[in-house]
Amino acid sequence: MHLFPAIDLKDGACVRLRQGEMDDATVFSESPAAQAIDFTNAGAKWLHIVDLNGAFAGHTVNGKAVEAVLDQIDIPVQLGGGIRTEADIERWLDRGIARVILGTVAVRDPDLVRRAAWRWPGQIVVGIDARKGQVAVEGWAETSELHAHQLANAFADAGVAAIIFTDIDRDGLLGGVNVAATQALAEAVDIPIIASGGVAGMADIEAVARAARDTTGTIDGVIAGRAIYDGRLDLKAALTWIENNADEPISRC
């Protein structure tokens, strides 16, 4: 299992939203690159970046901030937000992104996801963001009629590297990870699941690790943001705990 510290980008700054509301953002750093360096110094092996403006706009908006991060660190980065075409995917992979996260396009154009997973094995991740079990798209502004399990099963044989499952109702609220829903999804599909949304502290990391050991599926990691920025989760201590107590981390792409 692995812990992914998150950098969510809005207007070039590192922020955290509450339940995906762009008008309810807290700025934690004006320099995403400096924040990425801090995460690397703490021992992070992966970084999770989301272009929030891009998710709403349907195209990359915070590209300069992402490139600034890539120029400063040497750990692998997974990136999502506004990536909607094969050209977008290719551009970011060529630029040094290790894995691209496809969310809205996974609902709108699932064939694109399958083509991309075949063309770039191990480098395509599906982002499933759910509100009360229903998949949300366009930066969470719209809720589809698809259930999270339906969307996950649609890519059961596509060869995607992982699925990031975000419980929108918990995201940014420090209310705890929806471990039960994460485990249920892991057991429903033969695809590694990464939990996201609600991490409040070390207890959540331990809970996800227990679920990863207990599930018949695969839970590969957990994403944390606000808890790290607020000081509720000591990133270095959490990474050390995972190294000593959890399963082996996911392999680098």
Image: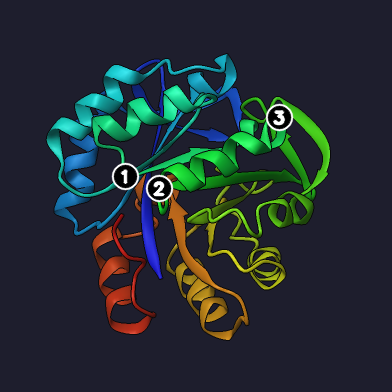
Task: Left or right? Give the position of 66 relative to 141.
Answer: left
Q: CA distance from mark 2 to mark 1?
A: 6 Å
Q: Which secondary structure lies at badge 1?
A: loop
Disc 2 vs disc 1: Cβ atoms closer than 8 Å?
yes
Disc 1 vs disc 3: Cβ atoms closer than 8 Å?
no
Name the residue carrying label 3: 108
The quarter of the picture where residue 55 lies is top right
Query: Which badge, 3 or 2, comes first in the chain's sequence?
Result: 3
- Residue 192: where, in percent of width, then height? 53, 65
Q: Is residue 100 above or below residue 3?
A: above
Residue kind at label 1, given as amino acid type: Ala
Q: Which secondary structure lies at badge 2?
A: loop
Q: Which secondary structure lies at badge 3?
A: helix
Mark 2, other Cα within 10 Å: few <14 / some 14–19 / many ≥20? many
- Residue 157: where, in percent of width, then height? 63, 59
Query: Which badge, 1 or 3, comes first in the chain's sequence?
Result: 1
Q: Quadrant of the C terminus?
A: bottom left
Name the residue carrying label 1: 98
Q: CA distance from mark 3 to mark 2?
A: 20 Å
Residue 106 in view here: no
| Residue at x-position 25% and y-position 72% | 240
Q: Quadrant of the N terminus?
A: bottom left
- Residue 39: where, in percent of width, then height? 23, 48
Name the residue carrying label 2: 123
Nearest the viewer among 251 and 141 is 251
Q: Is residue 20 above or below residue 167?
A: above
| Residue at x-position 26% and y-position 48% | 76
